[in-house]
Image (cartoon, rainbow, N blue to C red):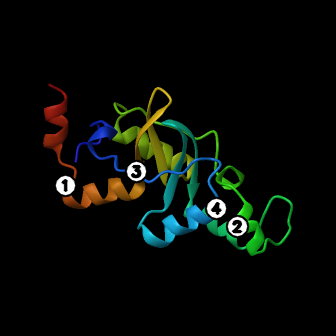
Amino acid sequence: MNLLAPVSRIMTTNLVTVNPKDKITKVKEIFDVKKIHHIPVVEGKKMVGIISKQDFLYFLHGFTDTGKIMGIDALESATCEKIMTKGLAKLEPGSRINVALEIFKENLFHALPVVDGENLVGIITTYDILSRLAEEPITLKDYKDSSQ
């Protein structure tokens, strides 16, 4: 795998997304059915946040910024904007894979939205990179080819 290649070569583009006004129950359904750990939050195509499975579980177990224990009513009435992470680091499709790795390392993120302007076009995760590395180990040939 060439770490200087653009993230667009390995990013996931078939995304499951939610809207900030969607209920948390929709997030629960997605995490229960899909094998994903991050759900981008969009308004139209504009990226406005992301919900990780950890964010959801933290909310589900009653830990909120107010310290109150939440019940089933809160789960049924709360919206995605309550638990989504805003102000994310984002990449462009042409950003290099090694840049994504540096952001993951420095910020302890596990997913980065890939945007064209403000529009979400994909997501890259640590899993995407590790999977590709398992399939295509890094070789010197990758770097010789990319320098030409």
Q: List the residue tagged with mark 2.
A: 76
Q: CA distance from mark 1 to mark 4?
A: 38 Å
Q: In the rendered structure, which amino acid carries the disc numbered 1?
A: Glu
Q: List the residue tagged with mark 3.
A: 15
Instruction: Pick the residue in front: 135 or 143.
Output: 135
Query: Does dot 1 land on a helix, a strand or a loop?
Result: loop
Instruction: Pick the residue in front: 94 or 116.
Output: 116
Left or right of residue 62, residue 30 in this image = left
Q: Which mark is residue 24?
A: 4
Disc 4 packing (10 Å; few <14; some 14–19; many ≥20): many
- Percent position (x, y) of residue 98? 37, 41
Q: Is the residue 131 above or below the residue 93 in the image? A: below
Q: CA distance from mark 3 to mark 2?
A: 24 Å
Eye-nearest disc, 2 or 1: 2
Is there a contact, CB below 8 Å, between mark 1 and mark 3?
no
Disc 3 packing (10 Å; few <14; some 14–19; many ≥20): some
Query: Does dot 4 land on a helix, a strand or a loop?
Result: helix
Eye-nearest disc, 1 or 4: 4
Residue in the image at 64% along x and 43% along y = 86
Residue in the image at 57% along x and 62% along y = 26
Q: CA distance from mark 2 to mark 1?
A: 44 Å
Residue 130 falls in image quadrant? bottom left
Q: List the residue tagged with mark 1.
A: 136
Instruction: Pick the residue in front: 41 or 97.
Output: 41
Q: Earlier in the sequence, mark 4 or mark 2?
A: 4
- Percent position (x, y) of residue 115? 44, 34
Q: In the rendered structure, which amino acid carries the disc numbered 3?
A: Leu
